[in-house]
Image (cartoon, coloured by chain):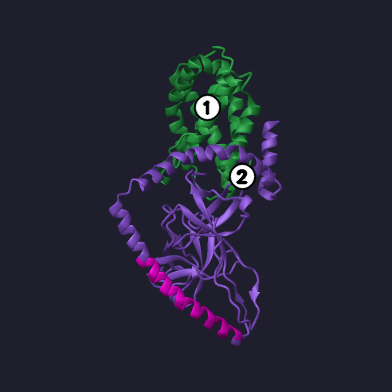
Chain colours: A purple, B green
Amino acid sequence: MAVLLSILVLSIDQYTDKLKSFRGYVSLLIVPLQYGVDLPISSVQNLSDFLLSYQSLHDKYTALQAEQANNQLKLLKFSALEQENIRLRTLFESSFKLGEQVLVAELVSVNLARYEHQVLVNKGERFGVHEKQPVLDALGVVGQVTNALPLTSEIILITDPNHAIPVQVNRNGLHTIALGSGQLNKLILPFLPNNADIVPGDLLITSGLGGVFPQGYPVAEVVSFTVQPDKPFAIIEAKPKAALNTSRELLIVWKNQSMIPLGSKSMTATDYAED
Amino acid sequence: MLRISHNNTLIYWLSVGVAMALTIIPLPFASLNLMPDWVLLVLIYWSLGRPEDFNIDKAWCVGILIDVLSGQLLGQHALAYVMSLFLVLKQHKMIRQFSIIQQSLVLGLILFVAQVVLFWIVHINHDISLSAFLWPVLTGILCWPLVFITLNKVRTLL
């Protein structure tokens, strides 16, 4: 009886998404447990932040201020470039996508299935998070939302063996797909020929194909390129840019679907929705 | 083991909760494979001790909880737990007579059944090898005396 019920549930969940709301309700039961496990870990981190000496705080502060000034300078130039880009695109009569909105979510330190690279964050459907939203951190692409539960959501990392992300070489615009390897510091690019124009050190950015990830975010850096003379494709490995195992704050991204109408002069900068 | 205590249900859910917490405790990826299936060990303990109260239905519910907890296909742990607990309940009178060491060995077989069921289901969507699922069987055998003695202590104390 229970076996039949399990098999029924298994097949329903495999082929449809009818059990999504059920999963949501059950997840409410286990959220306290997840936060309970996370609590000692996050409080140790908070404590170590609290115990930082004045000197190290001061050093950190000045370093961050310098970085902030630096970034501000780059942004100034960036907005000029953005305007120029829009003008040029208007000349080519192609449209331009608006910036994205982001929501800051914090990692809940629990481990999900052991053969998957998935993490849990503390923002869920209640904040409007939904499936297939891209997730970034300060350095690059982290992954995408696989399950949006009421209070939490599960995020699959780009290094999961079942994950693939369409990328582009920043230097020359070469398109390909990066697959997860199952190791946190490695992505594989299995679909490039032996004579592909790609060298170690090349930056891979999202290409925007596939419609999940917005275009132009850094994904990984190529670390090795091995030619296989007897096979059609080369072995290329890349290292993810995002700090997949250390960053606690992740950014969940909302894409802005509306295009800027051609010839329009008004342009809003990227909006940041604070949580 | 047959000592009657009135708040067994409370201890049951508490011990299952602790086992679930142990399951999701963050560890380095390498050592994750070594973690025994704590929840299944706890369920086996209860179905050996009080088979009439803590039966298949409760195991099914716990399995569903674990599936949601680990963000997996719903029902896989439920199926694995139900099948292995069925074996335990069938033979619980015999298994109860064994010494702890003997029990561990018999339970090894049952844990193996559970892990193989899990492997089959997970294998539908993931390309993984069976070896990752055999470690929990081994560590489960080693951890059974620990679970058994701890839960016995807790039950006599409360």
Residue B143 pos. (x, y %): 43, 28
Q: Are marks 2 and 1 in contact (CB under 8 Å)?
A: no
Closer to the N terminus: mark 2 or mark 1? 1
> Which amino acid does the dot numbered 1 rest on?
Ser
Residue drawn 42% across the image and 52% down it: A245
* Magenta segment main secondary structure: helix
In the figure, residue B114 lies in which quadrant? top right
Residue B15 shows which numbered tag? Answer: 1
Assign the N terminus of chain A to one quadrant of the image: top right
Residue drawn 56% across the image and 24% down it: B12
Residue B140 against residue B98 in the figure, above or below: below
> Which amino acid does the dot numbered 2 rest on?
Leu
How many other residues sit within 10 Å of disc 1, few (<14), some (14-19) or many (≥20)?
many
Residue drawn 60% across the image and 85% down it: A90
Residue A74 on the magenta span = yes
- Mark 2 — residue? B73
The residue positioned farthest toward the top in the image shown: B3
Which contiguous range is marked in magenta? A66-90
Assign the C terminus of chain A to one quadrant of the image: bottom right
Question: Is residue A226 in sight in this rendering?
Answer: no
Residue A212 pos. (x, y %): 59, 63
